[in-house]
Image (spheres, coloured by chain):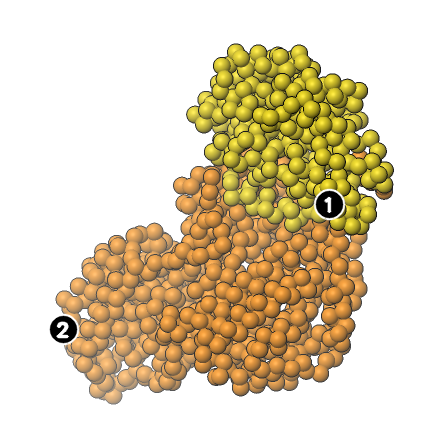
Chain colours: A orange, B yellow
Amino acid sequence: MNIKDIFTTMEYGPAPESNAEALAWIADHGGIAGHFINGKWATKRDDFATNNPATGEKLAGVTKGTAADVGAAVTAARKAQPAWAKSGHKRARVLYAVARLMQKHARLLAVMESMDNGKPIRESRDIDVPLAIRHFYHHAGYAQLMQDELPEREALGVCGQIIPWNFPLLMLAWKIAPALAMGNTVVLKPAEYTPLTAMVFADICQQAGVPAGVVNIVTGDGETGAALVDAAVDKIAFTGSTEVGRKIRVATAGSGKALSLELGGKSPYIVFDDADIDSAVEGLVDAIWFNQGQVCCAGSRLLVQEGIADRFYTKLKARMDGLRIGDPLDKCIDVGAIVDPVQLEQITAMVSANTEGETYQTTAPDGCFYPPTLITGLSPASHLMQEEIFGPVLVATTFRTPAEAVEIANNTRYGLAASVWSENINLALDIAPKLAAGIVWINGTNMMDAAAGFGGVRESGFGREGGWEGLTGYTKPKGTPKPLKPTPAFTTMDGTPADPLDRTVKLYIGGKQARPDGGYSKAVYNPRGKLLGHVSEANRKDLRNAVEAMNAAKGWAKTTGHLRAQILYYIAENLSARSVELAKRIKDLTGTSGSDEIDSTINALFTYAAWADKYDGKIHGVPLRGVALAMHEPVGNMAVFCADETPLLGLITPMAAAISMGNRVTLVASEPFPLLVAEVYQILETSDLPGGVVNILTGDHKDLASHAAKHHDIDAVWSFSGADISAVIEKASASNLKRTWVNNGRAITPSARDYLAAATEVKNIWIPYGE
Amino acid sequence: MTTNPTLPRNDGMPLDLDWVMAVQANTSAIERRAASLPGRRSVKKDYQAAWLCKAISLMDLTTLSGDDSAGRVRRLCAKARQPVRADILHALGMEGLTTGAICVYHDMVATAVNALDGSGIPVAAVSTGFPAGLSPFHLRIAEIGESVAAGAQEIDIVISRRHVLTGNWQALYDEMQQMRAACGDAHVKAILATGELGTLRNIARASLVCMMAGADFIKTSTGKEPVNATLPVTLTMIRAIRDYHDRTGIKIGYKPAGGISKAKDALVYLAMIKDELGDRWLQPDLFRFGASSLLGDIERQLDHHVTGAYSAQWRHAIG
């Protein structure tokens, strides 16, 4: 076409970004992506290929890391860690240098990413790479501030990090920057499809003066990842599919390894009838057609208010027609290639299998491309409304009222992100806290920044990346707790009652005393072997009933912190009034004086009463005209296996922490010394605590642990028990990926802040503003 | 130079306040779209040259100064006839390229009409007490008639900003309707003076009301406000145009004016129009740049395209 023709057609024409420098870089590095261990390139092997998905051509060979390779990397990281953890300021200087060097090589990184992954150069150049750089700058600051701002915490040690192919460099930055800032060393495994930007990053580490062994990269596939999970690391940080996340949860159960999982999603995109419709339509381009929809937090479930749905769909289809799909290295392309034919096949199969609703698709070139797709008229029961497609496919349904929007939005196993579009601030700010999600964007989507935590609830995983909240996942309380000595129950010697009056303690469920479902009771003896009474043996059905009671008490989460504080103070007051009697009970049960324990218990109640209305969230300094509110929300329904050795303090401390933040809790009392629960629930009953907020079971910890961890309607399980149940809980928690906090057989002494952090989720609500 | 069939004129419609009041414009979201668009679209080489020629063909080459004289206006008209050096146009194969129109004050209309005789280039007159629009209403209406009588084929009117700022949509509608009527067969461009309307929501609503009252074009600015054409304002106004077209089937034109002085900016505007409204809007009957210094930058870019060397301002004829 000559200029005159183009003048008539006004087509865009090709606008290619050169890949010559990136190809030369690969050639200069032997044409193979391999391990970077202890500051050096290890021997490279061409075990499999990484291809350019847009062309199908091989870009480089990839070395498949073996368990021995992983071991060598972990050894190097272990050796380097103590020195690296010494000076926050030195770490800050190194992280700053990394950020600066990434900036200098920004275009190389962007082109390499687009070649390897298939994402449009516009995205890698304008989003992925700048965000990754920002992550290192931002975390250089945390390294500098750690000593002053986190004086009670220290590095975990060596972190194993496994990242996905959808944002190879950005996920590397999200993993490595906070780990390094907090004094950890890392072994990172890039995704099998996309190892190349990690190679450039290794090069940058050398140039930036990152000490040998601090950053180690081992390339490979799922088996390499499994070897890293099994290796002698202190933490596994994983971003990827929920399926693999579950496997890692099971594999690390009971190992004492810390774990953070950032998994899948089916994030709702809610459009109310008073929204700026055109902007909401445009937002979907960034929500579901960003990175070909291969985004864990993609707004993939469109919920439109019924009255505007037809108009909205019409506008959306017109917008879809304008999307340009093709060569990722063309600067004028909106949608690039799917990362691999395997993924393309999966998307194609899922969409082809659907027989519901109406499907609208634009066109895509031949090859590893999938056309932007909209499927309207689905219902929550539709398969595609529930399952993550991980491609450029948007599914849609309608709602009538704000309450219904929330109900449909939360009708999912996932809980990563959500978008709310409305010009009514009352509506938007009312909906945001009601959504089961770790991130909510008001009138926007896919906003991310190093200063704000990213991560989800439910089966979207746990832990946050970014912001102050993200540092928790890369630190631990200082010091190493001692092994927990078991506290055996006293058994019978003569079995005669200590008190002739029979004493049988029931369970406490939903604010009422309840006989155990199984109809069994267990005798409790004092240190001299005299019978003190009987406690009920709770089974899984009693636990189920307790969960029902917790569900009925969900209103507790909406009460004010002031009210929760008042009730906690009242519990303390009533407990204090019965302190003589309780002290005697503790003495009878344990053989040691109970008065100190009672003082500590009242102290704990005062502590959490104090915190109830003071555990404030944060406003993050994100680069936006607006705010990102990091709000603390209750985790939900909790089960706690209480400490054995201090039957009252061990019962009340986690209870007070949990309910102070608005959680409902089912406590499984000290196994050897359960008999004082009757006094406790009498106190609760007289303290205005609504029924179901606290439920108390007695029984065998081992038996109840797996049932609690498996229960889909329990959101968190804690264990301070002397019973060996940490592994059981972590393993069984994989069912719904609930939060777990277990002692791993150690005598842990968490601070109030540790308890509060475990009792809350951080929800980041992004609120851009401006007229 | 348009080869498109003549579009039906916008006869307007009754003022639909329900529609007007339902219009929303989320500033942050609109700004995000405007900010990301330049990174999403790129035209290179021959395509860029063709697009820059297109920008020239869509240009209302403008002079609106107190010291305008007949000589100055004739010089500008000569530039409109030959906007780019002949050898460059020849090399591009774009002989015959002219600007879209000449835009002047009323007193210069007759001079411009004479100077452009036979070129087919229309003359646009700014009118209705431009730029403030606060002269007596009957004089503003009379001014339109005088300009039309002097040969102006396009009239750029200014709206009463106070009607927007006080939410008096009926008054805005009535005013616009009367101005449209006074234009007769001349096409009317409604200048919203967006820099003085306070919010994008106001801009969206004012755009809609002017279209309902029969505007053929909506235009951002007089060039005299503190803030003139911007991408967020453009997005807001062309989305209103799209909405109006969706519901009435009538295509309304758009003219950003003031502040667009770089070839690169012009390309971004064209891409925004193409993506949001479609190719049909990239014709002079539906899109104009109101600009004075933009042409010079485009000429230098075209010179570079042809010769491969960066050009200098003095190598191109002034207007």
Instruction: Decide if residue A298 is on the left or right side of residue A334.
Output: left
Q: Is mark 2 on a helix, strand or loop?
A: helix
Nearer the observer: mark 1 or 2; the answer is 1
Within-10-Å neighbours for mark 1: few <14, some 14–19, many 20+ = some
B290 or A644, nearer to the observer: B290
Q: Residue furthest bottom?
A: A493
Task: Locate residue A669 relative to residue B12 in the image: left or right.
Answer: left
Q: Which residue is drawn at 34% across and 51% down?
A: A558
> Which residue is label 1 attached to?
B312
Going by the numbered disc 1, the residue's amino acid type is Ala
Q: Residue at x 62, y 33 (%)?
A: B256
Question: Can residue A719 be seen?
Answer: no
Instruction: Point out residue B99 in the picture as x, y percentages from the top left corner.
Output: 74, 30
- Three-letter residue code for mark 2: Val
Judge whether A552 appears above or below A34 on screen.
above
The residue closer to the viewer here, A78 or B28, is B28
Which residue does the numbered mark 2 point to in the structure image? A580
- Which chain is indicated by disc 2? A
Q: Please, is residue A241 above or below residue A474 in the view?
A: above
Compared across the picture, whether A498 is left or right of B268 comes to: left
